[in-house]
């Protein structure tokens, strides 16, 4: 433990937007995180917790989420629901051991009005009861754990991202149609990997696909995929479906190509396999990989082009699905806070139920009855563009 970092971002000073990032404290002597005394006639500043990984294999994903959330604030005078925002960031780390205490600290010590973030499915499952019982709204801006908007859904937990089952099942029929033989399934061994593989298998087998084998690799510990790549080769599979993200995705895709599998055995996956900085690091090794996801920088809409340009300008790199999910969480909070009767969890979740359609760079989406994002999934293929690889959008998945 002790991996809790707090950053304070106070953004409104006489109508100016200020992007100062101040290290407020760490460990047990956490400092107060910025003023809440804006004097805004609409009810003063609102304190929002951002719970994202700042350490571990998913740290780059957390960075993207923070950049997406901050871009929305920058584009809206630093305000949500007409109020200045005091953003307190805490480190989710690599899973629930760090993520649960960081969430508790945001709620009990920092007394935020709502928490946004959570990358890892195991963290989401670990914090669910805490938010439910403390009646504090949690907007999950990545973690896809199926139960969060299924068996364990809560009035206080909402998701602006996807569910593991949906994003992976969407790809199943397309692979069943394209693959000439059986498909090998491989994923990181934790909640998300298990659910991604199960979701893909469901969609794939229902469409007549055959599975050649299945393997789960130790999460956050596997750097050398060689033994697993040998097993894939020995299985005689025609294609592979994989779930990896962050640093693991970089290693898997690079080694897949180095091992000589890329030429003969088509690689498919959930879009996180080739997303953002991961794709930049994989370079040519990723060309030809096909994935399902609800976003691509290449979406040819005016809304997305405007977003890509703005994000590129503020973050100095192209956006990712993680950035979009957090940007949209800010949009959701903006709407909800402007409608809410007060700051209590009850007031806010009532308003969350009425936010309607979100005008997102991914395309318009809205919450379904279980608080999950109801949206279009795209089929993407990595192509090398002008010097850099991109996820070209090659179709929509049913
Ligand atoms: C998850 O744990 O739910 C998860 C993590 C990283 C991703 C996608 C899903 O890129």
Image (tube, rainbow, N blue to C red):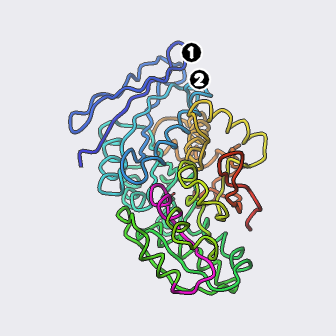
Q: Nearer the viewer, residue 204 or 336?
A: 204
Name the disc covering residue 221, or none.
none
Residue picked out by circle 2: 77
- Is 81 in front, or is 260? 260
Residue at horizontal 48 percent and vertical 55 percent from the top: 246
Percent position (x, y) of residue 300? 78, 47
Secondary structure beneath dot 1 equals: loop
Distance CA(mark 2)–CA(mark 1): 7 Å
Please state, as top left, top right, bottom left or bottom right, where the C terminus lies in the image: bottom right
* Label 2, residues with CA under 10 Å away: few <14, some 14-19, many ≥20: some
- Identified at 52% across, 37% down, the residue is 67
Q: Say which residue appears at 52% left-offset and 50% top-offset.
A: 141
Q: In the rendered structure, which segment of residues is drawn in magenta?
A: 234-253
Of all residues, the one furthest to the top in this rendering is 14
Q: State the image coordinates of residue 165 (x, y, percent, origin top left).
A: 57, 69
The residue that appears at 65% across and 63% down in the rendered structure is: 292
For ligand 1, tell me if the residue under mark 2 lies within 8 Å.
no
Indicate yes or no whether the magenta region holds residue 266: no
Asked if residue 180 is positioned above or below residue 364 in the image, the reply reads below
Name the spot of residue 168 as percent of width and height, x first.
Answer: 60, 69
Nearest to the observer: residue 107 or residue 392: 392
Q: Which mark is residue 15?
A: 1
């Amino acid at each position: 433990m002790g991996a809790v970092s707090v950053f304070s971002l106070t953004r409104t000073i006489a109508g100016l937007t200020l992007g100062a990032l101040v290290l407020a404290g760490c460990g047990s002597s956490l400092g107060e995180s910025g003023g809440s005394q804006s004097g805004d006639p609409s009810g003063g500043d609102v304190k929002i917790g951002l719970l994202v990984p700042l350490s571990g294999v998913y740290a780059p994903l957390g960075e993207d989420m923070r950049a997406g959330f901050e871009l929305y604030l920058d584009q809206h005078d630093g305000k949500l629901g007409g109020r200045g925002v005091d953003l307190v960031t805490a480190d989710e780390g690599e899973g629930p051991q760090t993520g649960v205490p960081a969430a508790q600290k945001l709620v009990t010590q920092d007394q935020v009005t709502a928490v946004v973030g959570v990358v890892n499915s195991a963290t989401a499952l670990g914090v669910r009861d805490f938010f439910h019982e403390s009646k504090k709204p949690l907007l999950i801006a990545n973690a896809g754990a199926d139960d969060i908007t299924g068996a364990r859904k809560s009035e206080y937990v909402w998701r602006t991202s996807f569910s593991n089952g949906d994003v992976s099942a969407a790809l199943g029929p397309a692979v069943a149609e394209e693959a000439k033989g059986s498909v090998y399934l491989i994923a990181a061994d934790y909640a998300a990997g298990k659910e991604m593989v199960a979701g893909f298998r469901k969609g794939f087998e229902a469409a007549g696909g055959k599975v050649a084998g299945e393997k789960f690799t130790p999460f956050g510990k596997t750097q050398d995929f060689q033994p697993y790549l040998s097993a894939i080769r020995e299985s005689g599979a025609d294609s592979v479906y994989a779930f990896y993200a962050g640093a693991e995705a970089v290693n898997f895709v690079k080694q897949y190509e180095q091992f000589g599998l890329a030429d003969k055995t088509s690689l498919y996956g959930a879009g996180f396999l080739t997303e953002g900085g991961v794709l930049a690091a994989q370079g040519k090794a990723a060309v030809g990989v096909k994935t399902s996801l609800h976003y691509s920088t290449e979406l040819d809409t005016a809304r997305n082009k405007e977003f890509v340009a703005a994000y590129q300008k503020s973050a100095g790199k192209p956006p990712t699905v993680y950035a979009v999910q957090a940007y949209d969480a800010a949009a959701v909070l903006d709407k909800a806070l402007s409608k809410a009767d007060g700051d209590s969890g009850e007031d806010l979740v009532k308003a969350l139920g009425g936010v309607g359609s979100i005008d997102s760079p991914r395309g318009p989406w809205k919450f379904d009855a279980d608080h999950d994002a109801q949206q279009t999934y795209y089929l993407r293929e990595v192509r090398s563009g002008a010097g850099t690889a991109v996820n070209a959008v090659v179709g929509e998945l049913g």
